[in-house]
Image (tube, grey):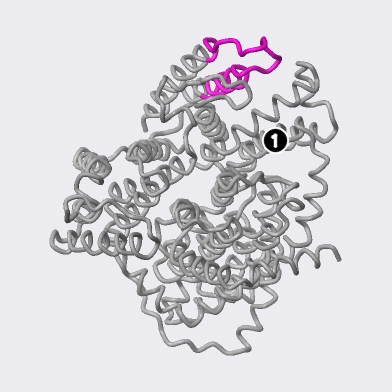
Amino acid sequence: METLHYLSIGFGVALQPENLMFALMGCFIGTLIGALPGLGPANGVAILIPLAFTLGLKPETALIMLTAVYAGAMYGGRISSILLNIPGDEPAMMTCLDGYPMARKGKAAEALAISAIASFMGSLIATIGLILLAPLLARFALTFGPAEYFALFVLAFATLGGITGKNPMKTLMAAAIGLIIATVGIDLSTGTQRYTFNVLELYEGVDFIIAIVGLFAVSELLFFIEEKAGAGREMIKVNPLKLKWREIVAILPTTIRGGLVGFIAGVLPGAGASLGSFITYTLEKKIVGKKGYFGEGDPRGVAAPESGNNGASSGALVPMLTLGVPGSGTTAVLLAMLVSLNITPGPLMFTQNAELVWGVIAALLVGNFMLLLLNIPLVGVFVKILSVPPMYLLPIVTMVAFVGIYSISHSTFDLYFMIAFGVGGYILRKLEIPLVPVILGLLLGPEMEKNLRHAMQISDGDWSVLWSSGLSIGLWAVAIIGLLLPVIVGPILRRRMQAAKSKVD
Amino acid sequence: MSKFNDRVFGLVMLVIAVAYYYGATQFPVPFGGSEAVGPETFPKLLAVILAVCSLYMIVKPDADNPWPVATTFLELGIAVVVLIAYALLLEPLGFIISTMLAVGTLCWRMGAKPVKAYLTGLISGAVVFVLFTYGLELPLPLGLLEIN
């Protein structure tokens, strides 16, 4: 009952005309971002954060817009998977398997419509899951002390590479780099200057928004230049849509299964949307068995991964909203937005900022309907924009990133900093060191240190306090499993995903 | 497959870890005496983690990703120089002119025809300028185009 009460408050916030408008805008931009290869959701949301700031939006409006962008990007990823056989973002990879063959058979419009419906179902199921699970988890998280939080942060880093991650040591290194950058500046509790080298601009520390935009947007530009992918690829023409009710009904069970599995994969640490869509696809193949023609354009093969990855993306919001610990790159960027709005993420947010949290959740539901409406009739518009070659698109995106960063503080120092982060990001990506842990380190660094301090003050300098309660031992155990599992199970899973992918090429 | 990249990077990070640790030992003792966890504890912990990871990378490096050939490297260099020049010239030249030059050059180097490239730069710059200055009331520098 309490949840329903809060949800109605949330709808009150989400249905305000201004918020509706920004949600619609976010949905549109998000679909676009998702559709464009080389402009992933994390990247896209990162570029929009400074703009949301300079617009002077209210916290809930800004967050509603960015969450809509996030949800939209998950919808958009499928468009380039189906038409170009290039996933617009990583989780959309599995959609290529049956989406592209379907499009080649002259059923591109049907594939796009089915995937939109599947995305809608996946999101809907997962958002309902979020509404049910988040308040419970938030209440549970209230029992966490500083020692548990410290262990939770370690867990977040340990599982961030995901089960499919290649080298857990590189994830750890990336996290350490991020945390180290976060220590630059004046120490909050003692006022000591740390690693500022007497440069005035460094006193306040490194602004993580500049770092995020640089790491994602600028390094992406450099990668496109290196791959000489400026001209883009040939696209399949979209035929007029001929979808029967019967065909929609036929995929509904698939989407419900996909949404559920996806949601669970999204909530669990270390799984994420890519694994979510992989599991749903494999599961569907098993369930349908020989009656299906997976890999040759089976509509269920389009519906399963799409509902899975949309379910996972909404599920990934659960740990971000309730614990303040994101499990994916994009939720980390959303967290950056929260932190810079001076909102402390975590369980208290559900009581202290109830309007904001529930407004965002209600906006997810509203946005999902908007996305469905946007994505079926307006798919032609997105296809048009998709045909703009990257050689025009990426420089313009870079320019938008410049404007965003410049308009925060009107200082060119920030721009140099952003470029430096871009070059650094390029080098890290070349060495296959993941960028998301760097960002998470930058974001969580201050909180992590604060919790360590509190725990040690309570215990009077006894380090064993960090693993003294049952809960914290559990968290440490999961963290260790999270680091070891990729080494054991990772190679098998990765080989299977690779094998599934290479069948298409 | 050479394994040069990871080793070099690991070595660089190891040096940074040591320097970072040394830096942490040099912090002045905070006012009111030191506590169990001072400003230096967390950085010291991080330095150790970074050092362990660096050593691991040096001992067990992954195979290298191929680095781009020299001409591509030149293109990357040009792109970075263009970005730095963009930041440098944003205020003196103004937003529209510097955007035309920067976006135009990037489009051109990525394979667009020069005329189309610089036209893209000019139009996108002008559109964003108008949008920001009049739509959002966030003035961007006008630079050379300013009429006194």
Residue A39 x %, y %: 42, 56
Q: Is residue A74 left or right of residue A82?
A: right
Within 10 Å of disc 1 (Cα), the crowding (few <14, some 14-19, many 20+) is: many
Q: Is residue B31 magenta?
A: yes
Name the residue: 63% across, 24% down. Answer: A189
Closer-to-camera residue (A66/A504): A66
Residue A431 % position (x, y): 42, 35
Give whichever of A354, B117 is nearer the camera.
Answer: A354
Residue A96 visible here: no
Instruction: From this view, report whether residue B31 is shown above or below residue B85.
Output: above
Chain letter of disc 1 in the image = A
* Quarter of the view holding residue A484: top right
Range of residues picked out in magenta? B24-53
Residue under label 1: A479
The image position of residue A207, as x and y in percent, is 47, 38
Depth check: give the residue in front, A262 or A213: A213
Kind of residue at disc 1: Ala
The residue under the point 37% across, 39% down is A414
